[in-house]
Image (cartoon, grey):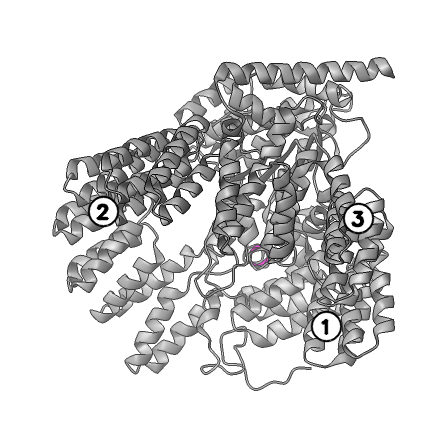
Amino acid sequence: MQDEQAGRDSALDELRRILADELARAGLTKTQVKARAHLGRTTVHHAFQVGGPVPTAATVVALARVLRLPEQPLLDLRRAAAGEPASVLPQGQGLGRPIGEWDPHALEVHPAGHALAGDVDGELRQALPGYVARAHDAILAGAVQDAAGGRSRLVVLVGSSSTGKTRACWEAVQPLAERGWRLWHPFDPTRAGAALESLERVEPFTVVWLNEAQHYLGDAGVGERVAAALHSMLTSSHRSPVLVLGTLWPEYATLYTALPAPTGPDRHSRVRELLAGRTVAVPDTFDQEALRRAAALAEGGDRLLAEALTRASGDRRVTQDLAGAPELLRRYEQGTPAARAVLEAAMDARRLGAGLALPQSFLTEAALDYLGDLDRDRLTEDWEGTVLEELALPVHGQQAPLRRTRARPASPVPRGQRPPAAGPVVRLADYLEQHGRSMRRALCPPASFWYAACNHLTDPAALRALSTAAELRYRLQCAHFLRQRADEEGDERTLLARADGLAGAGDHGEAEALYRKAADMGSIDALTGLARMREATGDSEEAANLYRQAAGTLDSGRLLSSGRAEEFHTVLGAEVFYRAAAGMGSRPALRALARLREKTGDRDGAEAIYREAAEAGDCTAMINLGWMREQAADPDEAEALYARAVRRAGVGALVSLARAREVSGDGAQAMALYSRAADADDTEALIALARMRAAAGDREGAVSLYRRAADHGDAHAWLSLALMLEETANHAAADHCCQQAANTAIVVGDHGTLLELAQMRWAAGDHGEAHALLRRATDAAAAAGAAATLVGWARRRVEAGDVEGAEVLASRAAEAGDAEALVELVRLRESRGDHQGAQEVADTAAGADDARALTVLAQMREQAGHTAEAEALAQRAADVSGPKALVALARMRDEAGERASALGLFRQAAEFGDVDAVVEVVKMREESGDREGAEALAHRATALSVYPHAGEARPLMALVRMRDKAGDREGAAILARQAADTGGAWQFGFEQRWPHGLDPDGRPTPRWHKQ
């Protein structure tokens, strides 16, 4: 045992020696390393501290990159120091299974054909063609390399159906298979449900496989929670490294990353944050280099690739051909009327939110109204079987338009919920699904579709999604009956939502029935909802029993998070959960319970609980208890408690708690804790305490504290001291402090202090010294990777009249790669007449696919009267990154009364697919009398929607308003119904036009009563 510990100590000493030697060789301070590695001060301190804890793998990787050291040898030393086994993960543990044990087809990699398995029976197995690496594969490989080096990563490939996204992910993880990594594909009972339930159990060295990530991130009930759980996993040092790989179609990526309307709800805020900077585009076609590589594989004997290259020689859609896309489309377009009807019903079901597995009975009944009268009359008695058999035939031996499938073995059906209806189910080919989303976006399904959904679908999530789709299309009666069916099938989320609504409206009897039904399915939220209702009616004893029943199903972590989230909005519920977590040994739960007692005025109860936690070794509880004893005039015990906490956790524990108390508004305790830490000469505590003393009017005490912090070499303390001395007109001493601040800031690379000093020197009239400090500050900011802060300071220099200084800052930030700095630099140069310089900067930004600088320059040239130059710049900006520059320029000309010129620009922007521009062109055509052209353009624009389940209706609704205003009520009503059919006009409201909704065929629904 002693030899083993000695080996660990030796490995840790060697790790620290290498880091310290390289730190000295690089001439960096730990403060600079902290900033460049994006690590905390304590984390860096511990990494270099003799006798400190073993750093995490993520910390070692971050330090290695800053110090330019090879990562793997350092990780090996860290693993030895921590006593971790050489293999990355013991076999048989963790979620998922080793990567090498997976069949790629089980991970939803599209089959491309069949090959003989090689046994005597000549068994057929699905085969994969040779792999052709493309640009996105290099990015994936980098993420895999980072993961192998100890850093968690997430990458989501975005591309159309059958473009090779899933295959690319499969190929990327193969190097990790050799290292023993596992792969987990959350799937059962639902993708989102499985992910949310188990993400917290993902262990290091695991690939999390989120193919078709919309099923996880876009789930209406838990998608945001899944995104939050992924973020927590990726940022957790003790769970690193993990690799999350996902795929998305472009329409979903656009939906999730689009900013919400200023007045609308932000439904995907956490998903948008998660995806920021983590999506990679996968092109639809092979470029010349990819075609060359594919041809080489084909010449080497890859039959599948050879055949695909022959068929796709014209459009270069090689991956789609391998997945059978062209033949699938031909089978749909040239199929029998009945086959087309069934496929269109399947397309509508999928685009409106039904699940992947569609019951055959639903599709054959839904298809009836897709047929004309003559085609329906020609149907034979056995037409369903004939059509389904026809659609099940594969193309090129690969995918079928509608293939039979079966759901994975599901979890046991919860109590109170009916099992799924028996009967075969089928799955629509991905390519046809996407084709349907595009071509049928503006269409509302016929009556047979909605009736069949009510009669045959049993999945509550599908019923709820179709109910929403019906409501968006103003088919209110269909929506009502589908929502009823979802309730009947016992969907937990639907039951909870209805129960919460009824409880809020005071209908406790019906709410209780729904809560209990959901609770029978195992819903914890139902139990807590029922408990809240009981508590509201004065039955605290029963409420507590229900809270305890709910708490009994959770582990301590979830109990604590539930209580902290104040999910129950009651003290009773939070206390039950905290107490249950504390009973499982959770120290944070004891602290939370004590704070809850404090808030409710029970100081004795709070003190008893803090004492219990302190006896268990909780340093934070010791500090809180010390404060309470100090308030109770017991300084001796308070001193002893503070001393115990410092001995166990260091002065940093006092500072951290003080900071938290200050943020929460408890200034008295914060000041007391800072004072304790300041007595130990903690620099952060000295500065914080000085700031608080100054705010309280104790200038003398603040100056003394700032001097002590400055003596420890803190540049900001010198600066703060200078400012206080300046206020007392002690200019000589203030100047001395400023010089000391500058000298210290230059040494440690404190760009913030240097920038503030530069501002002070400018205000004092010493412009030369101000610019010298600015140059020092820009160098320090660039070295620390904080160039973005320079842009804000540049704007402040402009406000102060220092255009030259602003340009120094913006130029340095631009050199460091900050894109916003280029925009600011264009403004500065164009404003002072350096038109060539502004153009050069805008060209640089455009070369990096950023058109903002070009857009700003176009607007400035337009305002200066250089319209031809402005238009040319706006067109270049549109070519780089979309038509917003053209739209902005068009609006400027429209406001100036130049309607013809504005129309030309709006047309150009509309050709790029900008909906705002399309609306303007539609309105201008209508105003000019071209009603037919306006309608045609508005209908074409329905395909521009960013929503997967709806079409773009704004151009149509613009025409509706214009025709209503012109007195054309009939024409407006026709267009309004067409807009409603898209599902994208819900925000315009049709209550006055159709108070009871629309029938499936578009006729106004007569008055009806909900049952």
Sequence order check: which comes first, mark 2 or mark 1? 1
Q: Which x, y percent locates residue 309?
A: 47, 27
Residue at horizontal 32%, vertical 33%?
773
Q: According to the image, label 2 marks what residue?
A: 801
Calculate the distance from the C-alpha at mark 2 to the C-alpha at mark 1. 61 Å
- The residue identified by callout 1 is 499
Query: Which circle's residue, 2 or 3, is located before the other in the chain?
Result: 3
Which one is in front in this view, the residue at disc 2 or the one at disc 3?
Answer: 3
Q: Nearer the viewer, residue 617 or 876?
A: 617
Q: Residue at x 63, y 43 (%)?
A: 655
Q: Earlier in the sequence, mark 3 or mark 1?
A: 1
Q: Which residues are magenta?
A: 341-347
Q: Amino acid at mark 2?
A: Gly
Residue at 60% of width from left, 85% of height from top? 1008
Quadrant in which the N terminus appears: top right
Q: Quadrant of the C terminus?
A: bottom right
Q: Amino acid at mark 3?
A: Glu
On whether residue 346 falls in the magenta region, the answer is: yes
Task: Judge depth for marks 2 and 1 and give the one in front.
Answer: 2
Q: Taking 460 as reference, is 725 left or right?
A: left
Q: Position of residue 114 (x, y in %)?
A: 65, 29
Q: From mark 2 to mark 3, how far is it between C-alphas?
A: 58 Å
| Residue 343 visible within the image | yes
Task: Give me the C-alpha separation between circle 3 and circle 1.
Answer: 51 Å
Task: Tell me if 684 is positioned left or right of 878 in this view.
Answer: right
Q: Give the crowd class for mark 1: few <14, some 14-19, many >=20 residues within 10 Å.
A: many
Could you tell me residue 199's position as x and y percent?
A: 71, 43
Q: Quadrant of residue 501?
A: bottom right
Q: Mark 3 sits on what residue?
A: 637
